[in-house]
Image (cartoon, rainbow, N blue to C red):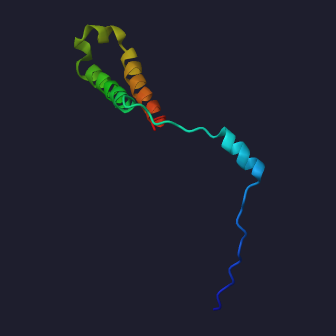
Amino acid sequence: MPKSKVRKKSVYTPPEEALRARGAQAKVLQPSPRWYAPLMVALMLIGLLWIVVYYVAGDRIPFMVSLSAWNFAIGFGAMVAGLIMSMRWR
């Protein structure tokens, strides 16, 4: 079977106005500070440990007994904060 001809497409070049407007709006994103990644990981681990400790020994720790179901909010809140930080990490 004969091979079909390949059509050549012209290379797209954006208009000059679009290039100037984009160059003015572009902003250089700086890398995250050195403390950002350890804090992010620490928040996720603290949240996980909080929930594990609540399950294992929550009935023997007085302030965890008084918090009751708020222990889940504290643990998952710390983990979610770490996950949100991971999305902004550069």
Q: Position of residue 85 (x, y in %)?
A: 45, 31
Q: Determine the image quadrant of residue 37.
A: top left
Asked whether, in this view, residue 84 is left or right of residue 3, the answer is left
Give the mark count: 0
Asked whether, in this view, residue 6 is left or right of residue 68, the answer is right
Asked whether, in this view, residue 39 is left or right of residue 8, the answer is left
Q: Of all residues shown, which one is farthest toward the bottom?
A: 1
Residue at 73% over, 55% down: 14
- The quadrant of the rendering that contains the N terminus is bottom right
Q: Which is nearer the eye, 88 or 3?
A: 88
Q: Determine the image quadrant of residue 56.
A: top left
Residue at 63% over, 40% down: 26
Q: Which is nearer the eye, 46 or 42?
A: 42
Position above or below: 24 against 4: above
Position above or below: 58 against 52: above
Q: Which is nearer the eye, 24 or 71?
A: 24
Q: Position of residue 70 (x, y in %)?
A: 40, 15
Q: Position of residue 13 (x, y in %)?
A: 72, 59
Q: Which is nearer the eye, 28 or 66?
A: 28
Asked whether, in this view, residue 31 is left or right of residue 5, the answer is left
Residue at 37% over, 22% down: 75
